[in-house]
Image (cartoon, rainbow, N blue to C red):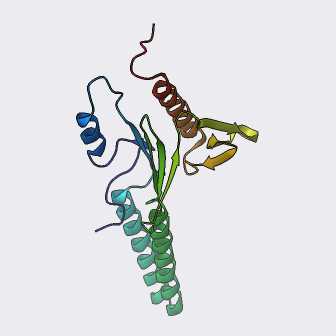
């Protein structure tokens, strides 16, 4: 069984379980629905692609190693095996770092950002939705940094996202915060 069990292609995805649906179904009909996004790092090579790539690398290494073995350069065969093993280890480490994800949950009472590390350790950060602001700091060459600011403090999140994805998260989250601050009784014109 591979470590990357579910394809996580979208950086902004619905929650992996139905917890948001359960919360929303228990709320009164006029209450705003909770806002929740799960941020994943992008991995362009899925499990099937990884299997194909490793089969190709292993096959080429084996065939080339056999050619050198037949020419009498038998130590080269071991280096080709080591080369394939190092490529495998590098991809496994990359997939392990891809298990990092962050959830952003917004209710009328709190904005919570939960970061789950590849080791399974969780960090949770709570903010008051009426005080927190979404800040997208633009840097040179279009690079940006997504932060939440409140009471003179800043919290960076979504660092594994691309610049365009951070812009999208910034806009969506700022809109959700504005809607939360307005409340359910005010109707837009």
The number of discs equals 0
Residue plotted at (49% across, 69% down): 93
Q: In front here: 143 or 50?
A: 143
Q: Is residue 72 visible?
A: no
Q: In front here: 55 or 11?
A: 11
Q: Is residue 177 above or below residue 159?
A: above
Q: Is residue 36 above or below residue 177?
A: below
Question: Where does residue 74 sit, x and y in percent of width and height?
Answer: 49, 92
**In this rendering, would 131 be left or right of 106?**
right
In the displayed image of the protein, which residue is found farthest to the top?
189
Q: Quadrant of the C terminus?
A: top left
Residue plotted at (31% across, 60% down): 5
Residue plotted at (70% across, 43% down): 152
Question: Where does residue 115 sit, x and y in percent of width and height?
Answer: 48, 55
Q: Is residue 95 above or below residue 58?
A: above
Image quadrant in which you'd find residue 2: bottom left
């Amino acid at each position: 069984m591979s470590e990357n069990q579910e394809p996580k292609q979208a950086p902004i995805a619905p929650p992996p379980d139905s917890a948001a649906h359960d919360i929303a179904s228990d709320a009164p009909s006029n209450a705003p629905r909770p806002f929740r996004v799960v941020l994943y790092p992008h991995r362009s090579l899925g499990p099937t692609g990884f299997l194909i790539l490793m089969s190709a690398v292993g096959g080429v290494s084996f065939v080339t190693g056999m050619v050198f073995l037949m020419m009498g350069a038998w130590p080269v065969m071991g280096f080709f095996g080591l080369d394939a093993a190092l490529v495998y280890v590098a991809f496994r480490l990359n997939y392990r770092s891809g298990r990092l994800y962050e959830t952003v949950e917004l209710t009328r009472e709190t904005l919570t950002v939960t970061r789950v590390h590849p080791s399974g350790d969780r960090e949770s950060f709570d903010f008051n939705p009426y005080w927190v602001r979404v800040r997208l700091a633009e840097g040179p060459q279009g690079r940006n940094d997504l932060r939440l600011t409140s009471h003179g403090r800043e919290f960076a999140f979504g660092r594994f996202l691309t610049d365009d994805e951070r812009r999208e998260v910034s806009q969506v989250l700022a809109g959700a915060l504005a809607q939360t601050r307005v409340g359910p009784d005010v109707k837009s014109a």
